[in-house]
Image (spheres, grey):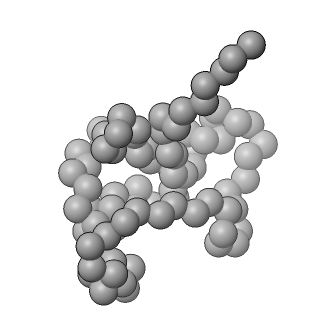
Amino acid sequence: MDVRVTSTVVEIATKDMQRALGFYRLLGFDIPDPDGPHVEVDLPGGNKLAFDDEEIIVGMHPGWNPPTQQGRVALAFAVGDPSKATRCTKQ
């Protein structure tokens, strides 16, 4: 069987939806205000960036526990000026 795997969604589980969305808005993403525990935004190339609050993740995966340390998932986005990205991470 010939299977072609393509990236479609990068999902971020967050305990603070507003803070997470605010950070990605600082990076220039046009993210709508949430009307529930799930938010999606289209990315270039046909992918989506999705945000779910931790409660919805627990509902889909009983027994899941939020990570207690950093480094579980890494995302990289190219920016024209790295100093602007650094300023965003400090806010």
Residue lying at the far right in this picture: please name it. 63
Residue at 33% over, 62% down: 24
Residue 60 vertical placement versus 87 (above, below): above
Residue lying at the far top in this picture: please name it. 1
Q: Is residue 53 left or right of residue 57?
A: left
Residue 71 vertical placement versus 81 (above, below): above
Q: Is residue 46 left or right of residue 2?
A: left
Res 55 quadrant in image = top right
Residue 84 drawn at (x, y percent): 27, 81
Residue 79 vertical placement versus 44 (above, below): below
Residue at 28% over, 66% down: 27
How many marks the image carries: the answer is: 0
Residue 59 vertical placement versus 72 (above, below): above
Name the foreground residue: 53 vs 75: 75
Q: Is residue 31 left or right of residue 70?
A: left
Q: Quadrant of the C terminus?
A: bottom left
Q: Quadrant of the N terminus?
A: top right
Residue at 31% over, 70% down: 79
Residue 4 drawn at (x, y percent): 61, 25
Residue 70 drawn at (x, y percent): 65, 72
